[in-house]
Amino acid sequence: MPRIEKTEALARVEAERHRLPASFEGCVMCALARGFPADTERLAESPRALAVLDRFAARRGHVLVVLRRHVESIAALSWDEYAEVQKLAWEATRALEHVLAPRRTFVAALGAATTRVNSFPHHHVHVIPIEAGDTQDRPAQVLTWELGVYVYEEGEAKALGEALRGSWPARE
C-alpha cells in the first residue's frame, strides 16, 4: 500500500469533490452515505449510518463511519443516530482487530466546522488501526496527512474489504 504526498492527496480529494453530482452540494460524506463513488468499499450498514474503507487512509484499514443524513454537530444527532454510528465504529474495531491484529485502534469523531479540502462538516467517525508502536502513533500523528496518505493498489481495497466483511460481528 503506497503513500502519496499530502499535496497530491489534497488535489485528488478536491478533484473528486468537483466530480460530485450537484445534489451532494460538495459534501463528500453525503456522497459516501449515498453510495458515491460506486467503487468505495462498503463494509457494513445500518438504517442511519454506514462503514466504508477510507480511500485516502491515514493507515491501512482506516474505516470511516458516516451518518446517512447531513448533520454537522454531535449535539444535533438523535440518540438513535449517535448510537448507530458508535455501534458501527465498535463493530469496525472488532473486525479490524481480527483481520489486521493492530497494536491499538483509534476512534475519533472529526469534521471541520467549515468545508475544507480534506474535512467536511458532516458527522463521521474515523476508526484507525495502529501498527507501528512509535511516535507516529500519537493522536496528532495518526490523524494528520503530513506524513503522506495511503492509497490502495489495484484489488487491495477489495481484498481487505472482503476480509473485514467476513469478520464483521453479527448484527443483533
Image (tube, rainbow, N blue to C red):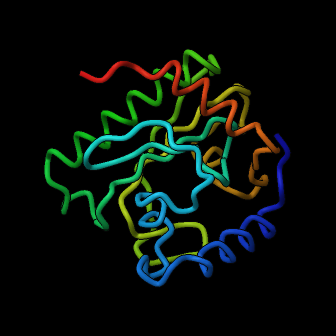
Give left or right: position of 167 versus 102. Answer: left
Q: Nearer the viewer, residue 23 or 79?
A: 23
Rendered-image quadrant of the C terminus: top left
User: On the rendered structure, is 75 left or right of 161?
Assistant: left
Horizontal side of residue 14 vs 154, given as left or right: left
Placement of 8 over or under 168, stated as above or below: below
146 left or right, relative to 29: right
Q: Position of residue 134 (x, y in %)?
A: 73, 29
**Quarter occupied by residue 157:** top right
Q: Position of residue 98 (x, y in %)?
A: 56, 15
- Quadrant location of the N terminus in the rendered image: top right
**Residue farthest along the left direction in this orientation:** 79
129 is higher (above) or lower (below) than 47: above
Residue 125 coordinates in the image, percent (x, y): 42, 48
Q: Is residue 18 above or below residue 109?
A: below
Q: Residue at x 83, y 56 (%)?
A: 4
Q: Residue at x 53, y 20 (%)?
A: 166
